[in-house]
Image (spheres, rainbow, N blue to C red):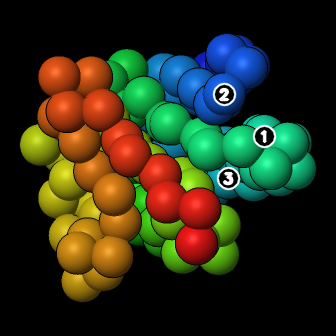
Amino acid sequence: MHDIQAVDHGAEVSIGMRGEFDAYSLPDLREALDRVCAFGKPVVVDLSGVTFLDLQSARELVLRSLIQAHQLAFENPSSGVLASIRALGIDHQARIYGGREEPPVFSEA
């Protein structure tokens, strides 16, 4: 079971992800990312509610971050979510933050 909620805050869009993300939920994740990335605004994905993230879903998130010229950042990942991202060997290419105490800074590049 999974849930994805997007909120437009004006200057940026936030996505709250909850539950388990696997091959079954991948089409929903792609659709949500397509929708919010089309706004052309920075996107912050809150991963605090994710209880499972398979490698396909982790790959989708990181690749979207690269495609969006780093206008996509992630916050509050659990150790399990970080492990999925690190297993791909591309965690150094994603913008990952522990929380809003270290807010994402987006460049105009």
Q: Name the residue under label 3.
A: 26
Direction from residue 43 to residue 83 in the image, left or right:
left
Q: Is mark 1 on a helix, strand or loop?
A: helix
Judge depth for marks 3 and 1 and give the one in front. Answer: 1
Q: Where is residue 91 in the image (x, y as percent from the top left)?
A: 26, 71
What residue type is disc 3 on? Leu
Residue located at (42% from left, 28% from top) = 46
Q: Can residue 2 be seen in this view?
A: no
Q: Which residue is drawn at 47% across and 52% down?
A: 106
The location of residue 58, given as percent across then percent down, is 44, 61
Kindly identify the residue that appears in the image at 72 percent across and 43 percent down.
41
- Disc 1 residue type (three-letter): Val
Quarter of the picture containing the N terminus is top right
Residue at x 23% of width, y 42% of height: 97
The residue beneath circle 2 is 11
Q: How far apart are marks 2 and 1 (CA)?
A: 13 Å
- Which structural element holds mark 3? helix
**Snapshot quadrant of residue 80:** top left
**Residue under label 1:** 36
Relative image position of residue 104 (x, y in whole percent)? 36, 41
- In the image, residue 68 sits, relative to residue 51, either above or below, namely below
